[in-house]
Amino acid sequence: MQAEFRAPRRRTRVQEEYEAPLPVSRSPRERTDLRAELINLHVLVCQPDHIQKIYNQGYFGKGVLSRARPDHSIFDQWEQHEGSFLPLVSESRYDEMLKWAGAALFAQGLDDEAVSQILTRLSQPVEMEDVRREETSSSYRDPESDPDPLVRGAGFVLVCDSKVGGGVREVRRAPFSLSEYLQLSLEEAFFLVYSLGCLSIYLHQEPLTIIQLWRKFRSLRPDFVSSYAAYHHFRSRGWVPKGGGGAKYGVDLMLYRKGPPFYHASYSVVIERVDDAFIGSALRPFSWRSLAALNRITANVSKELMLCYVIHPAAQSEAELDSPECLRRLKVQDVIISRWVSSRERAEQDDI
Amino acid sequence: MDDAPYRQEEDSSALDVVGVGVCDSAPLLWRMEDLKTLRSHGLVGALLGSLPRTPRQNGRLGRPLRLLPEEERQLSEQHAAAALPSGNQQDGGGVDLLRQVEQHEEEQRRSYEVQSVLALEERKSALLRAMTSSHTDSASGPGTSDEALRGRLEALDHSFTFPCAALAVQLSTSRAGLTYCPVDRAVLRADWPIRAQPDTCGDVRYQVFRDLRGRGFYLTSAGKFGGDFLVYPGDPLRYHAHFIAICLSLDESVCVLDVLAVARLGSNVKKTVLLCSPGTDGAVRYTSLQWSGMV
């Protein structure tokens, strides 16, 4: 009986292009400087071009309003109009959005006069030259210092006056817009900062050093060392480990080849922390019953269960764990668990 | 059936007593009437043995029947089961056993002799066929071929031995002997304990088992699904399981990933997961989990 390694299963409909495995360029002279913010214990990337780069090259992170890629939009119908791609809304929906914008302005303390003035100014029809001019000169706005959506004036919409398609389209300003951020998990953020060196994380406009980040993340998650060691191990093997989706299957990580849009997840990983003699306080204490359930559900969704043991050296002090240098003394061992059904193997032998 | 007079001797109001054989701490039922009695109590058990006629499969299994520890405990609390005396067969049947062995060996010897004669006959006829067919092909005279044939046959007579390993042995597949159980039924009393020491651990499981059984559900083991019991609304031969019951004590802490995994499994196999905990007042509290919606 031998261990069987199954090839990753490709998804049936692949709509994306594979750009690059990691958001770093091949030539050593080019430096990638990406920026993220540590806001309220989460790492968020706010600039749209940085978001695209980090997500498309390596599939790091998750859009805060979306399932995977940050592509949430409040408009679901879009149309080409004189050279620009604009969202299409009906008159009634546009009025509804104006009302919401008005309510937001009221909440900010403006009086009736000012609100109705702003709304009338907003709903004036706009010429296409203005649209094109604004599109070419889009500049970065800091999310923290600019909370007012109306001042940002992002985007234009096509308002059509009849419910059925066809009818005159009018270009107007969108009353408000929603920009979505990319949220990185702690392990992903630390990997980009420490291993690749392409990301800087800012806290209150100040970039954090690697040691500060390590200590901050360790204070946020007590088992950060083991989970980061496992993440780093799988990334360096070429897998794309995704953390959040693991809870769906009762595990810590799901491993994808190249990325979630291309292949189904190959392995479900449970991270365990042990010391040299393979004894340790289990991060996830299994009983036979829970291991059987996990094995069964993993087989039902066509993945394979893998236990990843992060082995700490015998004499390791707290002080040593205080710096990412402790990573070089850790070892990682992977064990794949599969269920052996005796009658199935016998049937195969009978055929032979 | 020869069991009928015994059954009439017992008190008709008392339930029949099930004889349980203990093999290395596993409670087993061997006799057909015990299996039927068990089913009438509403307990199912699990068949373990292979069937003599279809040995190389485990889709359908035969006796013995293994009881869950909770089933055994319930039977002993209801005084409906007793230990099968295990040494009974050998005490009275020592002489019988020797005689049976001698008979068997005698039969084997006779069978060997008959079979060796038959084998020799068959070899000779095969040789004859081979020689005559080659004789028609070759152009030699009839006299020399007859002599050669006779010579070959005599050589075969001298040198032929029938190997023991080629002996065909008949196995009796019907009445494999489990119905023959020389235990005096009247001797089987319900106050014989099945085991010496009571089983104190597994109390949580037993309370849940007793509660669900009292509500009329049939329970079997759910090791395959990572639960404790599979709960059927009626006899398992007629219904699919509705629930997977997992027994937890109220102060036990459970990892949330385990709860997610088992809830997901339940929806994959179309059963509802029940988390069962016996409360302090003796009543059992049930929480059902359903996985709804996927993001």
Image (cartoon, coloured by chain):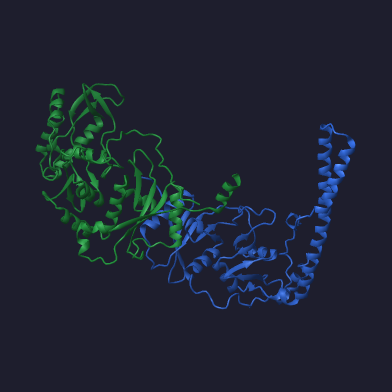
Chain colours: A green, B blue
The residue nearer to you, when weighing B44 against A308, is A308
Left or right: residue B33 versus residue B102 is: left
State the quadrant of the C terminus of chain A: top right
Q: Quick check: A166 above or below A194?
A: above
Q: Is residue B98 above or below residue A224?
A: below
Out of B262 and A243, give the one closest to the viewer: A243
Does residue B50 appear left or right of residue A154 in this picture? Answer: right
**Residue A287 placement: quadrant:** bottom left
Name the residue rendered at 34%, 41% in the picture.
A260
Q: Is residue B38 left or right of residue B198?
A: right
Residue at 49% x, 70% y is B202
User: Residue B116's image quarter?
Assistant: bottom right
Tell me if residue A344 comes above or below residue A117 in the rendering.
Answer: below
Comparing B94 with A183, the one in front is B94
Q: How many marks?
A: 0
Q: Is residue B190 left or right of residue A326?
A: right
Q: Quick check: can you spot residue B287?
A: no
Coordinates of residue B232 in the picture (x, y in percent):
55, 57
Is residue B292 shown to the viewer in this render? yes
- The quadrant where residue B36 appears: bottom right
Residue B133: give x, y in percent of width and height: 82, 36
The percent position of residue A300, horizontal first and vertical second, equals 46, 48
Q: Position of residue B103 (x, y in %)?
A: 80, 67
- Write the residue at 36% across / 64% down: A278
